[in-house]
Image (cartoon, rainbow, N blue to C red):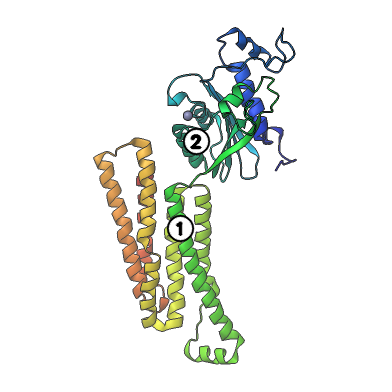
Amino acid sequence: MADPEAPPLAAPLSPEEMWRQAVQSQRGFQSSPSSAADAIRQRPATIPPGAAAGDKGPKVGKGFETFAGVQVLDKDGRRAAFGADFFGGGGLDEHAEARIVRGLEKNGPAAVQHGRMIVVVETDCCPSCEARLTAYAQRKGLREIEIHVPERESLREAGKMVTPKTASTTSLMDTGKPTTVRKLRSISVPPPVALAKLDAFRITLLNQVNFYSSEHQAERQLATDSFVGYVTNRLFNPDIPEMMIWNNAYARLTAVERELRHENVKGAFKELVLARLQYLRALRQYLTWKDGIEGAGTAMITAICAVAAVLILGAFALAADAIGTALTGLLATEQATATAAASARVAASLAQFDAAIASTAAGGETVGLRIAQIEVETAVDEYVEIIMSR
Ligand SMILES: [Zn+2]
């Protein structure tokens, strides 16, 4: 896992190192003194003066305090950020993890796509902290959160483990039992819902393009490789389209994937609409050759339903809602009206395009189809502008 090329600060710390450096030593140095015993915090790794052989030594820090360290790793396992803090009293906002999340939001990276978060904490995260860590991870593109806690065997009962908090507060005592760090659990972070829906639509569309372009490729093979095929196709279907008719759809789908990777909902939505237009255009050309004009019309209606525009619109509206609500809360009536109008225009333009492509003769370019496509592009541009600027 360690990358020899990584700059020193990008070298990841093991959970054990995180515990030693960020949790145990923080407890040693940062908790507020409350008794004579706490003086040991000044020298957490030394034997206190006057200690006799066999002394167990004092507990360090107060039990209600909770220390935590959080490390963010990128997809290659390099360290992208590190934070450490502690809970010394107060509400949920003051929990160590909540404080660390605020620090990381302020000083940490903007995005760490497909990264991972390692949390080392003295006691399992509470639901509030877990929600905050998950929301942070989701915003940054992280996919997994690991929670690690300290562990030590009980002094009285062999084989039984003390609580992580006890293991931590007594870790500087000479108990004769080692304190280790173990992974308690993993949380897999779901991608934001809207992105997941847009991605699901991308896959549906990609499968359709793959399906028809493979069939197209096979037909071409037949037409050129076999004499019978050649003659048949020459006689009845003289102009088999070139494979390049699918290129635009593939290029747009690649763009969708790139935008989704950057979690750019706006860009992904726009490219997805355009990918769908390019796919339907190519399909129209291919089906017209294969099934003739009549047959192509029917087949097109089925194909259009398989990639219904309402699916993309739904995913995008969801994202826009989430973003809009997060930014400004409730919309002003005027803005809400403009948004609804823009969204209706997109839906109408897509319906118009779908109707045009299902009825265009011979897969050819007609004025109606060209106008319908321009209208879709304009409506989508307007929609993303209005909805994302609110
Ligand atoms: Zn908490």
Residue 204 position in % (x across, y down): 46, 63
Quarter holding residue 115:
top right
Which residue has dot 2 on it? Answer: 133
Task: Please name the residue shown 29% across and 38% down the image.
Answer: 330
- The residue at the point 46 percent across, 34 percent down is 132
Q: Is residue 160 left or right of residue 371?
A: right
Q: Is residue 374 above or below residue 265?
A: below
Quarter the C terminus occupies: top left
Tell me where residue 388 sits by quadrant.
top left
Q: Is residue 30 above or below residue 196?
A: above
- Give the amino acid at mark 2: Leu
Is residue 138 in view from this perspective? yes
**Nearest the eye: 102 or 243:** 102
Q: Which residue is mark 1?
A: 200
Upstream in sequence: badge 1 or badge 2? 2
Picture coordinates of residue 256, whole percent (x, y): 49, 56
Q: Would you place residue 380 above or below residue 118 in this image? A: below
Counting other residues with Cα less than 10 Å from the Cα at mark 1, is it few (<14), some (14-19), or many (20 or more)?
A: some
Using the numbered discs, state the Cα–Cα distance from disc 1 to disc 2 in whole angstroms: 26 Å
Q: Nearer the viewer, residue 364 or 96?
A: 96
Q: Would residue 389 be seen by someone viewing this image from the given angle?
A: no
In front: label 1 or label 2: 2
Q: Quadrant of residue 283?
A: bottom left
- Residue 127 got which mark? none
- Name the quadrant of the N terminus: top right
Side of 62 relative to 18 (left or right): left
* Residue type, mark 1 in image: Ala
Q: Element at badge 2? A: helix
Depth check: 243 or 57 in front?
57
